[in-house]
Image (spheres, grey):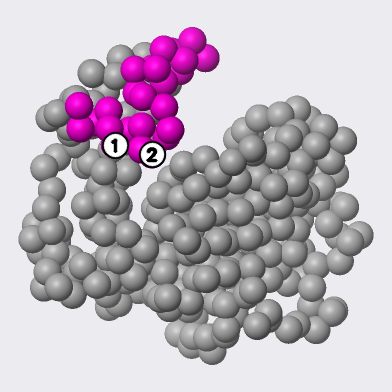
Amino acid sequence: MGLSLPNDHLIEGRAVNTLINKVQDMADHEGDFTTCVPHLSLFRRDSPTPSPMPVIYQPSIYMVLQGSKAAYLGKERYLYDPMHYLVSCVPLPLEGQILQASPDTPYLAARISLDTQMINELLIEMPLEPKPQPLSEHTSNALGSANRGIYVSAIHTDIQNTLSRLLDCAQSKEKAHVLGQLALKELIYHVLNDEHGTLLRSFACQDRQQYQIANVLQYINRHYALNMDIPSLASKANMSESSFYHHFKAATNTTPIQYIKTVRLHAAKRKMLFEQYNATAAAYEVGYTSTSQFSREYRRLFSVPPAQDARILTKV
């Protein structure tokens, strides 16, 4: 059942066009763009993605200004477009697919990386939690866990207006320096206070089990090359092994061991792309001890053997 909202609370076509024009001024060709506002990045694509592509979503708010995109977590689909934004509360291995884009009407999006310190500062000033609401129909087949580390929510007027001011800051170094952090803080405030903000809060509150899982996920993403097992990770989360396994899978829709494998494989691909590692060197660098196992698992995730990908990536 979709979320029903008053029309005057939803983003309007005129406001969308204003946002599109602001982004196009800064993203006038296909690519990824950093801005002078910390934590704010812009994206433009001129064609759809033929099929879902493996990617790790970092803790961020993702807002599409034009076009649409789907993120897949196992069998769950999260659709976001100019009427809906996506929040990834923790690092998650997903498959992403841009559904609508063309040279005349490119896919345009903004990503706001989540600042843990800023969230914690806001939560101190926001003791009351909003009442949890049913998840949007754009989050299909995703009701297996109320503690999943990802969700989609409708964009309301207050969020849209704040995003507009944030984009204004990104067009001026002076505004970015003076007002950028204020606009970021206001945007995160509205997201925390939105109908599904309790999900983001739960991964930021230190007395919640989701917070302990979030810390473990960050640890894995920083130290993926180390030997890890469920007992040691459960200990870091201050949980029993069975409780840790349950809460980990509830947040990520995957097992701890599979999550570690996926993070390592993405890290190997980045090393081949940006550091000119060959496949064997990348495998050992990210923690694999068997190159044959690395090759099998890499091909399963990315659909090509790592040696072939290495030759392609080092030519990019």
Determine whether, in the image, residue 83 is placed left or right of residue 131: right
In the depicted view, which residue is nearer to us: 225 or 33?
225
Residue 249 lies in quadrant: bottom left
| Image coordinates for residue 51, horizontal then vertical, percent | 59, 41
Q: Are marks 1 and 2 in contact (CB under 8 Å)?
A: yes
The residue identified by callout 2 is: 301
Q: Secondary structure at mark 2?
A: helix
Mark identifier at residue 52: none
Determine whether, in the image, residue 296 is placed left or right of residue 25: left
Determine whether, in the image, residue 166 is placed left or right of residue 306: right
Q: Residue at x 32, y 29 (%)?
A: 268
Residue at the far right in the pictured view: 14
Q: Quarter holding the N terminus? A: bottom right
Residue 280 lies in quadrant: top left
**Distance Cα–Cα, label 1 vs label 2:** 6 Å
Residue 232 lies in quadrant: bottom left
- Majority secondary structure of the magenta segment? helix
Type of the residue with mark 1: Glu
In the depicted view, which residue is nearer to us: 305 or 108?
305
In this rendering, does residue 241 appear at all? yes
Per the rendered image, the range of residues in magenta is 292-316
